[in-house]
Image (cartoon, rainbow, N blue to C red):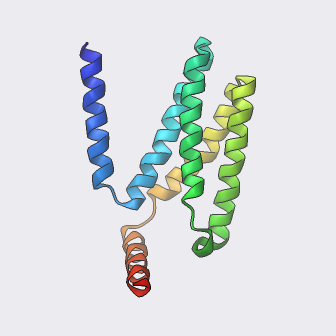
Amino acid sequence: MALKGINAYKKGNLKQDISQADPHRLTLMLMQGALDKLAYTKGCIERKDFAGKSEHLSRASAIVMNLRDTLDLSEGGEVAGNLFDLYEYMLQRLIDANVQNSLKIIDEVISLLSPIKLAWLQIPESAKQEAYEMQRQKRQAAV
C-alpha cells in the first residue's frame, strides 16, 4: 500500500515538473526517461520477465520516436537530419533487441543516446535563450 502512495507522489511530481519545464528541459526529461526504460528493460531480460521487457521497451521506443518526430528538419539542417537518422537506427535496434532479447543491443542504444543527452546538458543558457527568442519572433511574424 505504501508503494502505491509513493508512485502516486512521483507521478504528481513528474506532472508538475513537465508543466513547468521549458522545451530544453522537456527534451532532457525524455532522454532520461528513455535511458531509464532501457535500464529497466535490461533488468527484465536478465530476470526473464518478458512481459516487463516488452512494456519498458515499448515505452523507450515511444520516447525515441517522440524525440525523432519533434526534430525541425527544415530549420535544423544537417544536425537535425543526422539526429533523425540516428533515432531511426536506434528504433530499428530496439526492434532487434526485442526479438533477440539482447542485452548487447540495449547497451548499444544506451551508448548512442547517452552522448546526445550529455551534449544537450552542455548547451549554454545563452544559446537556449537565443533559440527561444528566435522562436518567439517567428511566431510573431506569422501572426
Residue 21, x across and y down, in percent: 32, 55
* Placement of 54 over or under 74, stated as above or below: above
Quadrant of image for the N terminus:
top left
Name the residue located 75 percent from the left edge and 24 percent from the top edge: 100
Number of numbered discs on residues:
0
**Of the pair 41 and 50, the residue shown nearer to us:** 50
* Relative side of 49 to 98, left or right: left
Name the residue located 62 percent from the left edge and 65 percent from the top edge: 80
* Relative side of 102 to 66, left or right: right
Q: Quadrant of residue 41?
A: top right
Residue 84, x across and y down, in percent: 66, 58
* Placement of 127 over or under 89, stated as above or below: below
Q: Name, please, the residue furthest toward the front.
A: 143
Q: Name, please, the residue furthest toward the bottom.
A: 141
Q: Quadrant of residue 143?
A: bottom left
Residue 28, x across and y down, in percent: 44, 51
* Placement of 128 over or under 93, stated as above or below: below
* Placement of 83 over or under 40, stated as above or below: below
Residue 89, x across and y down, in percent: 72, 47
